[in-house]
Amino acid sequence: MEPAPPVEREKWVPERWQDDGPLRDAAREATARARGDEPVVREKRAADPKRLDPSWVEEVARESDAKTSARYMERLAAATEALERDRYRDALRMVSSVLKNLPNVGAAHEVAGVSYYRLGEWRKAINELLQARALHPAPEQLPVLADCYRALRRYREVEDVWMEIRESSPNPSVMAEGRIVAAGALADQGDISGALELLLRVADAPKRVREYHLKQWYVIADLYDRSGDIVKARNFFKRIAAVDPRYADVSDRLATLGRR
């Protein structure tokens, strides 16, 4: 497979990758979210409830009175911004009053679930995400939930959630996130060929490359590398480099593959 030529792609902000396994990284980075992709402003400022998803605002307003809703919205906004800044313990602390006093606000459980997920506290994350799903179902929660099950080696649940993702027909990025987790679960069980088969179904280069395409290609390249197919691994890493040569550790991976 020849590397694809450079193609048009949307502007995006490179992500922070951790060195704890490329498949888990891809899934974790793919599913990390806090209602919005805008850059985080780093200077001190009050949390702005206007940045919250409108459905979250509706939840808080429904579960509280006019006197207290503004305070809880600000706490939820502060927790969301802490989550965006990778301050997961702070996010949990900030959302705790919402969870305690407005337990039927699914948005608060989602923030807590994603925070626990990023901290690697899988069981707590599952508990919060399941409550979020029961109160305020959102397709974006599902890949995070699936990856928690994957971390606990509960592969049957991973497959069940992946099936739910497929049946819900979410937007392409959520579908890609779920596919990455499902492929990772197969690879964890030694079925690298099955993982590749799942990802190669959507491996063609589109006219406009988005972030989730790069993530999928990275996982495919890594799987080929693990399977010993260096040529195909190099081609997929080259495909990524043709779009963004600074993406993750692609340049290092290509240099390493070139020496084999």
Image (cartoon, rainbow, N blue to C red):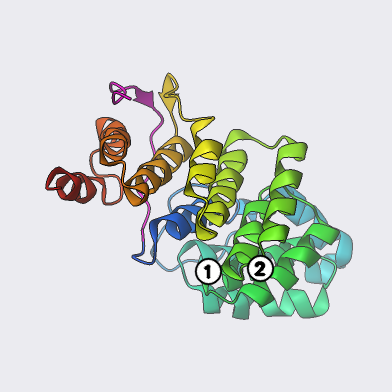
The vertical placement of 251 against 74, above or below, is above
Secondary structure of the residue carrying numbered label 2: helix
Q: Quadrant of residue 109?
A: bottom right
Quarter of the picture holding the N terminus: top left
Q: Is residue 206 left or right of residue 182?
A: left
Instruction: Measuring from the top left, give residue 132's x and y in whole percent.
Output: 77, 62
Depth order, front residue of 137/223: 223
Looking at the image, can residue 77 be seen? no
The number of callouts visible is 2
Range shown magenta: 1-17
Q: Quadrant of residue 9?
A: top left
Magenta span contains residue 81: no
Q: Earlier in the sequence, mark 2 or mark 1?
A: 2
The vertical placement of 223 against 71, above or below, is above
Instruction: Measuring from the top left, give residue 76's x and y in whole percent.
Output: 66, 66
Sort mark 2 into few (<14), some (14-19) or many (20+) by Cα contacts within 10 Å: many
Circle 2 sits on which residue?
Answer: 113
Residue at (76% x, 46% y) in the render: 164
Q: Is residue 68 left or right of residue 243?
A: right
Q: Amino acid at mark 2?
A: Gly
Q: Amino acid at mark 1?
A: Arg
Instruction: Measuring from the top left, give residue 59's x and y in whole percent.
Output: 81, 58
Depth order, front residue of 33/225: 225
Magenta span contains residue 14: yes
Q: Is residue 227 left or right of residue 93?
A: left
Depth order, front residue of 73/26: 26
Circle 1 sits on which residue?
Answer: 118
Secondary structure of the residue carrying numbered label 1: helix
Q: Are marks 2 and 1 in contact (CB under 8 Å)?
A: no
Instruction: Measuring from the top left, give residue 12's x and y in whole percent.
Output: 39, 40
Residue at (45% x, 65% y) in the render: 85
Residue at (63% x, 53% y) in the render: 143
